[in-house]
Image: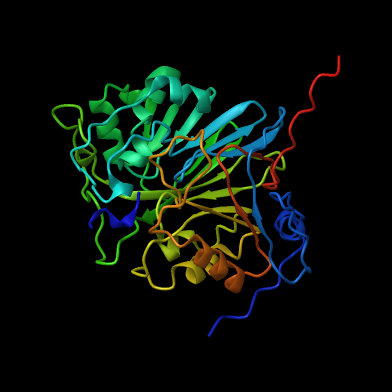
């Protein structure tokens, strides 16, 4: 969620030729107007809008905020699927912590497919509010913290359906590998954030308002589908444990944009720890109280342009893809083409 709710570079390491090298050099489909491919020594920034896709062995779709849907060979993994996107006053200067929680099943079903795994970074409403419905409606395996476990149990989710993790676990879901990464929640200019705290037992009643959902510690995940599909590092907040991410070396890095400078040298430290990913995708920069049917509108607290400039400066060979709700991306984060209309 937004952090404002509570009001010399080292030499680059040489890289062996592999998938990440290919990703760095790939030419990505761009928005209108198309961006020309740059010289190899510089990065490209790609923005996309309004693309749909045919069936593909690997695809990625941004669900807004930090959420993702990853489809691999007919199997679906969700990360932080917040789809109902109800109003709290956060983006109108009238934030109301007592806003009632709700989930819109019809809107959720439009986007989730048949998920097999749901990964939850932390328990604030803009990450977990739709997870109880998804869990009960689909039977998907939910992976998250102890706090996430206790909250979902209070919402009536079967405890046997939830896998509690802490960080450092490497889980094998029949060929889809999920590395759990200890992480941190982002902070505002006062170095605080909304609704901290953890739970060690289910609350006596199901949470009713957004303030009833504590953060409950924060996780990141690296998903490696196998079969030649790229590994994807997924963040739910704009801070991290440098030691925990060191050496992950993902092909794709879905990185949350920061709203303040309270985390020292956030972008450079993260990119160096991740090994300068082949593709960087900024997330959690949008107004997450507007429906996914509209084009993304920026959260005014997030300086997306400054984030992109920092990535360019720190990791000039990385491709940068600014995602769109309506675009489905292939395994190299290229926008997938619209299917041709039937000709007869």
Question: Would residue 139 be seen by someone viewing this image from the given angle?
Answer: no
Q: Is residue 39 left or right of residue 252?
A: right
The residue lying furthest to the right in this view is 344
Whether residue 135 is situated above or below residue 61 in the rendered picture:
above
Up/down of 25 relative to 143, above or below = below
Q: Residue at x 70, y 72 (%)?
A: 14
Depth check, front residue: 63 or 19: 63
Q: Specify the quadrant of the image occupied by residue 24.
A: bottom right
Q: Nearer the viewer, residue 232 or 178?
A: 232
Count the labels in the image: 0
Toward the bottom, the furthest residue is 8
Position of 131 compared to 73: left or right? Answer: left
Q: Nearer the viewer, residue 195 or 107?
A: 107
Residue at the spot 49% in from the left edge and 35% down from the top edge: 292
Where residue 58 appears, as percent x and y from the top left, is 68, 36
Q: Nearer the viewer, residue 300 or 244?
A: 300
- Name the residue located 77 percent from the left edge and 65 percent from the top edge: 38
Q: Position of residue 311 (x, y in %)?
A: 57, 67
């Amino acid at each position: 969620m937004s952090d404002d709710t509570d009001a010399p570079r080292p030499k680059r390491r040489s890289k062996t030729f592999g998938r990440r090298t290919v990703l760095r050099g790939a030419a990505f489909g761009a928005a209108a107007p198309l961006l020309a491919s740059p010289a190899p020594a510089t990065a490209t920034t790609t923005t996309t809008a309004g693309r749909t896709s045919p069936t593909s062995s690997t695809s990625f779709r941004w669900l807004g905020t930090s959420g993702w849907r990853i489809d691999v060979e007919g199997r679906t993994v969700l990360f932080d699927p917040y789809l109902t996107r109800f109003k709290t006053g956060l983006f109108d200067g009238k934030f109301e912590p007592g806003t009632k929680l709700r989930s819109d099943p019809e809107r959720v079903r439009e986007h989730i497919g048949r998920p097999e795994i749901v990964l939850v970074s932390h328990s604030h409403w803009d990450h977990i509010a739709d997870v109880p419905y998804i869990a009960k409606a689909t039977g998907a395996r939910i992976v998250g913290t102890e706090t996430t476990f206790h909250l979902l149990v209070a919402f009536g989710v079967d405890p046997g359906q939830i896998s509690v993790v802490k960080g450092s676990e490497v889980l094998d879901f029949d060929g889809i590998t999920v590395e759990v990464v200890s992480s941190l929640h982002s902070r505002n200019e006062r170095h605080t954030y909304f609704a901290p705290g953890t739970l060690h037992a289910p609350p006596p009643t199901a949470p009713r308002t957004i303030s009833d959902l504590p953060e409950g510690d924060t996780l990141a995940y690296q998903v490696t589908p196998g079969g030649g599909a790229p590994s994807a590092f997924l963040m739910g907040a704009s801070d991290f444990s440098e030691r925990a991410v060191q050496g992950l070396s993902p092909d794709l890095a879905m990185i949350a944009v920061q709203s303040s400078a309270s985390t020292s040298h956030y972008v450079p430290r993260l990119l160096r720890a991740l090994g300068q990913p082949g593709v960087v995708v900024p997330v959690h920069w949008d107004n997450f109280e507007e429906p996914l049917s509209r084009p993304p509108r920026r959260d005014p607290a997030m300086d997306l342009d400054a984030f992109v400039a920092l990535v360019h400066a720190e990791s000039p060979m990385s491709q940068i893809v600014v995602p769109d709700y309506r675009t489905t991306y292939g395994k190299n984060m290229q926008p997938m083409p619209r299917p041709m209309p039937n000709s007869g």
